[in-house]
Structure formats: structure tokens, C-alpha cells
Amino acid sequence: MPLSPEQLAEIEELRSHTQPTLRATVPGMEAHLYKAQPVLDHGFVRVIDYMGDDSAICQAARVSYGKGTKSVQNDEGLIRYLMRHWHSTPFEMCEIKLHVKLPVFVARQWIRHRTANVNEYSARYSILDREFYIPEPDALAAQSVVNNQGRGEMLQGQEAARVLEILKADSTRAYDNYEAMISQEGQSGLARELARMNLPANIYTQWYWKVDLHNLFHFLRLRADAHAQYEIRVYADAICEMVKDWVPAAYKAFEDYRMGGATLSATALACIQRMLKGEEVTQENSGMSKGEWREFCSVID
């Protein structure tokens, strides 16, 4: 169950009250507030709070107050200029706070983005729920033979069933032992901060994650990419849908220049210039390594 009865009650209570405000609000984002977007089998992402909008980005870039005489088109053009020229501080004027429930091994990947404020559920004080990420059969893949950190062909039939049974059995056994070790109902037992070390990395944790838009875009560029690990990519995809409703002009520019764009080295740019002149360019005469040439071809093909 993604949300506990207590969390559902909290959401209903929060959504039942509205407060007048003078700060900028975004209708699309207001609709996301507190609602949990399911991710994986037990996870979710929900917006707790946000600050700023597209106009806040432009305001910071112009170092002025209010919208003045600038039109929406001018704002969109400015945002695209800022994104195109890799400006960062105007996008830092917008912030978002998310409540995320995710498997521990996904959290360990996520936390490598050291540009956010994070507060995680503490297994030193509380007992973790019996909830584990068990992949769907179509998410089980063998190790890639060309990429040491990627997936290859999908597991099929009996092999897929065997792996799923191991994952389920090991998760259940580890949690049974966790419960047996910890102190409960006045009985003496192992401290929770020690008992947790026996739990598998597919158990779910939760945290509050607050980040500015500039660093969020960097996170999404890497984690919403088709090459990112599936289990973190689905979280990034869910966040993308929220950001799209929050800062539509900035997100459109981000999609165009970051997600859909490409960065070329000086060597690659020289190769394109030679191609435009009608020259035949190959890996051997390009000045690129085999890996660089393969990536270059994937961009221009």
C-alpha cells in the first residue's frame, strides 16, 4: 500500500483547508499539492510545497520587481535564452519540496545528487514496514554484455520465475529475522539501529527532498534519460509531469535544450563542418575514439 491510513488522513486534512496568500501560486501545481503519485509497487511522489513560477525566473534575471510591461512571449523568450546559455541562478529562485517513498537501493543512487535538503525516515527510532520492491516480470533483465552498469536481454520463463521467488523469499526471511531481533511489547531485544542492518536493499524508505529548479533539472536530465536505471527513471518521469504543470515555459526549454538537445565537442563540431562541405568523415579520420564516434553517430543519425 503506497500510503498508510494515517498519511491518507493527513492529506485529506491538509487539502480540506485553504489559506489566502499574496505569494505567486500556480493552478497546475496547486492541483498536485499533497496528492501521491504512485510509483513502482509501493512507492510514491507527492508535492509538499513549492515556491516561485516562470515569472520568478524572469524577475530574477531582470533583477526587477513585478511583471512590468513584459509580455508572456518575452518571458518565454528570456527563459529559453537563459536555458540556451546555461544560466543557473535565475532557475534557483524556484524551489520544490517532495515527499518520496522509494526502495533503499534507489535512494542510494538518488542521494548522490548532493544539491538538495534531505530528511529521511529513521530506522533507528521507528520500525520499517514490511514492504519490498519486487520487480514485475518484464522488468527482470540479465547483465548487459556491452555496458557494465546496464541491463541486457530480458529473463524469460523459468529463469524469471526462479529469480522472482528468490527475491520474495529472501525479503520475507530477512524481515522475519528483523522482527525477531528487535525489542517489542516490553521484551528485550536488539536495538533497532542494529537490527536494521540485516534488511535487504529493496525495502522501502521515505524522505522529504527539497531542491531548487536548477538542480532539479540536472537531476531530471540524468535520471529521466532513457539510459537511466528503470527504478529511478520512473520516479524522475513522475516528477517531470509535476514540473511541467509548475513551470511550463522553463520545462519546455529544458526539454528542448537539455533532454532533446546534444552537446558536441570541438572535434565533433569540426566533423560536422567537414560533412557539410561534402567531405567523407570516418572514425579513422575523425580524431575520435571508437566510443566517441559511436556516440557521435547516435546523435547525427
Image: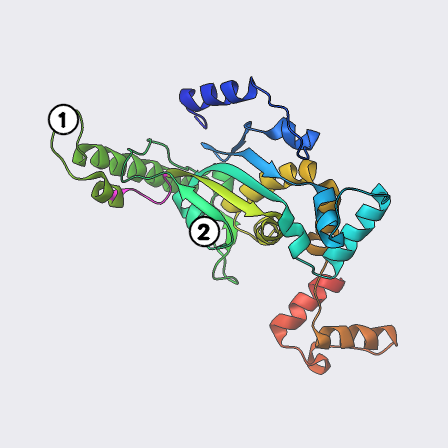
Residue 65, labelled with which disc? none
What residue is disc 2 on? 111
Task: Pick out the residue farthest to the front.
Answer: 65
Q: Which of the pair 235/52 is nearer the observer?
A: 52
Residue 165 image point, x, y percent: 35, 37
* Element type at mark 2: loop
The residue drawn where x is 50% and y is 56% is 150
Closer to the N terminus: mark 2 or mark 1? 2
Locate residue 58 relative to residue 215 in the image: left or right: right
Residue 194 image point, x, y percent: 21, 44
The residue drawn where x is 39% and y is 41% is 120
How far apart in space, not on screen, are marks 2 and 1 (Cα)?
Answer: 36 Å
Q: Amino acid at mark 2?
A: Ile
Residue 12 seen in this snapshot: yes
The residue drawn where x is 56% and y is 18% is 17
Q: Is residue 56 magenta?
A: no
Task: Report the span colored magenta.
Answer: 198-203
Q: Amino acid at mark 1?
A: Gly
Total numbered circles: 2
Which SS does the magenta portion mostly show? Answer: loop
Residue 186, labelled with which disc? 1
Residue 161 image point, x, y percent: 40, 38
* Element type at mark 1: loop
Q: Which of the pair 6/260 is nearer the observer?
A: 6
The residue drawn where x is 33% and y is 31% is 129
Locate residue 198 relative to residue 64 in the image: left or right: left
The 10 Å Cα crowd at callout 2, few under 14, some 14 to 19, many 20 or more, is few
The quarter of the image holding the C terminus is bottom right
The 10 Å Cα crowd at callout 1, few under 14, some 14 to 19, many 20 or more, is few
Q: Which of the pair 199/295 is nearer the observer?
A: 199
Q: Is residue 199 magenta?
A: yes
Locate residue 264 relative to residue 289 in the image: left or right: right
